[in-house]
Image (cartoon, grey):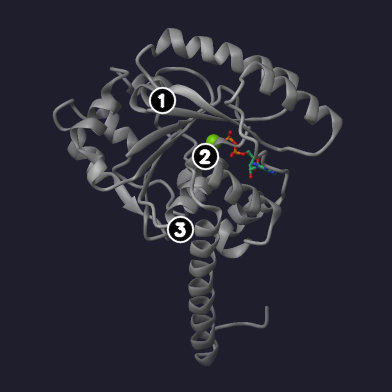
Amino acid sequence: MKIISILNHKGGVGKTTFTGSIAQALALTGRRVLAIDNDSQHNLSSLLNVGSVQPNILDVYRAPKESAPKRLLSAVVKTGLPNLHIITSCGDLVDGCVGDAYHLKNAIDECSLERFYDFVLIDNAPGLDQLQASAVNACHEIFVPTELCQFAVDGLVEMERTLAARCPLGGRVSKIIPNFYRNVRRHNTFLAALNTMFPERVTSTSILVDSVFDEVVTEGKILFLHRLYSKGAACYIRLVHELFMLDEEEVWDAVLGKRGEHMREEARERYYKMKEGSVGDD
Ligand SMILES: Nc1ncnc2c1ncn2[C@@H]1O[C@H](COP(=O)(O)OP(=O)(O)O)[C@@H](O)[C@H]1O
Ligand SMILES: [Mg+2]
């Protein structure tokens, strides 16, 4: 089992979109995935159409050390995709809830999550405080989605320094994923700078700017089932192949198969609703 934290001290760089999309893609290819929403804004919980439920990650942080593993397991809920589960978050989650920055790690270690999952993906709020430190201490690797602009690139060096000082035993930044990419000179310049500063760690796949990410969230849809032919979905299929060394054809076969099943189901549901007269003209 691999535990990955998705982290960037900046907000709005695509951490939650990345976590949700990667989690869905891995689950569609049959990997067993647990997503953990470690952000009080609980956007990941919304993206996966679960919302904030109780118990959630806050209850895990609040539980005494001995009962935290049990709490963690009881906080797991199913999503609309069979292999994808989530521990949701809530608005009351603040740094002060985390006493011991190893609490989450201990809880995960103690409940032998590897029996149930191949991947654990932890989505984080912006910043580098106790909540993020907990996730970093609990993980094996850190993935960093980033924008391509001067402040973002400068900030990553600083972020890595802070992480090494605050979480010496935690996971390290293994991949940096350029997001909001457009093939323009400015973006290509920053991309080249990133590659020079972090050799071997910047993914060769950049995620293109695509309004599809906002659309699927607004409509409560799943990127790979409802917008598979978008640029955004294609970027994520390449990313899954690159980050997890999954065969591209295997990913396509799995996703196309699940999409077909899903569309047949949707059509059938619509048919019966129409028969009962409960579907309008839209
Ligand atoms: N590649 C992209 N192209 C266009 N919009 C994107 C892309 N990635 C993310 N977004 C959008 O940008 C906004 C911020 O993304 P989000 O994942 O919430 O960032 P973070 O979790 O880092 O705060 C969301 O509205 C999301 O739909
Ligand atoms: Mg977020």
Could you tell me which secondary element the residue under label 3 belongs to?
helix
Quadrant of the picture in which ligand 2 is shown: top right
Q: Is mark 3 within 8 Å of ligand 1?
A: no
Q: Nearer the viewer, mark 1 or mark 3?
A: 3
Residue nearer the viewer, 191 or 43: 191
Residue nearer the viewer, 105 or 246: 246
Total tally of numbered discs in the picture: 3
Quarter of the view holding residue 91: top left
Give the residue pinned by disc 1.
94
Residue at coordinates 81% horizontally, 38% vertically from top-left?
183
Q: Farthest left residue?
A: 66
Q: Nearer the viewer, mark 2 or mark 1?
A: 2
Q: CA distance from mark 1 to mark 3?
A: 33 Å
Q: Nearer the viewer, mark 2 or mark 3?
A: 2
Residue type at the position of mark 3: Leu
Residue 216 percent coordinates (x, y): 61, 56
Residue at coordinates 67% horizontally, 14% vertically from top-left?
154
Sequence-wise, the earlier of marks 1 and 3 is 3
Give the residue pinned by disc 3.
28
Residue 176 percent coordinates (x, y): 58, 28
Numbered mark located on residue 243 in the image: 2
Residue type at the position of mark 1: Val
Residue at coordinates 37% horizontally, 28% vertically from top-left?
139
Quarter of the view holding residue 82: bottom left
Sequence-wise, the earlier of marks 2 and 3 is 3
Could you tell me which secondary element the residue under label 2 belongs to?
helix
